Amino acid sequence: MQRLSILLNVLLASTLAALASPLPDTNLLDKRITHDGRGTWYEPGLGACGFTDSASDPVLAIGQGRYGDGGNCNQWVQITNTATGATAFGLTRDECESCSTEDLDMSPSLFQQLGNLDQGVLSISWHFQPKGWQP
């Protein structure tokens, strides 16, 4: 009888400990997800993150729906051209009003690491790098 009581107490304590554990940060989990979308290019200037960039900077704009409050500003993104396998890294510095949440708009220099500007649109996969990471 005493063993049953101990077992029930252990089960109760384990259940309570699991319920008291914090829930995972969904924003952190989102950053580990690989997104599939379209890659386009634009001429950077003063971006929504508050920085002025040029066409030679490896910067990008994320879709307005993903931009939110700008929490991804200055976060690096790994981008792959799904047709060729070419990979590049870009720094999030702006929001793209015409992009879906899965699309990226890239500076000319970043886009050219993945394809030719004449193509205009690339099929890409991409994901955020951890905050603080740099290539």
Image (cartoon, helix red, strand yellow):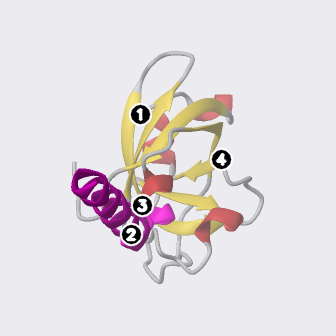
* Residue 36 left/right relative to 87: right
Residue type, label 4 = Asp
Q: Secondary structure at mark 2?
A: helix
Name the residue: 27% across, 59% down: 10
Return the x and y of residue 26 as percentages of the image width and height. Answer: 50, 62
Residue picked out by circle 2:
16
Q: Earlier in the sequence, mark 1 or mark 2?
A: 2
Q: Is 26 a magenta residue?
A: yes
The 10 Å Cα crowd at callout 4, few under 14, some 14 to 19, many 20 or more, is: many
Return the x and y of residue 93 as percentages of the image width and height. Answer: 47, 68
Residue picked out by circle 3:
28
The 10 Å Cα crowd at callout 2, few under 14, some 14 to 19, many 20 or more, is: few
Q: Nearer the viewer, mark 4 or mark 2?
A: 2
Residue picked out by circle 1:
113
Q: Nearer the viewer, mark 1 or mark 2?
A: 2
Return the x and y of residue 14 as percentages of the image width and height. Answer: 32, 60
| Residue in the foreground of this view, choosing between 6 and 112 | 6
Which picture quadrant has residue 28? bottom left
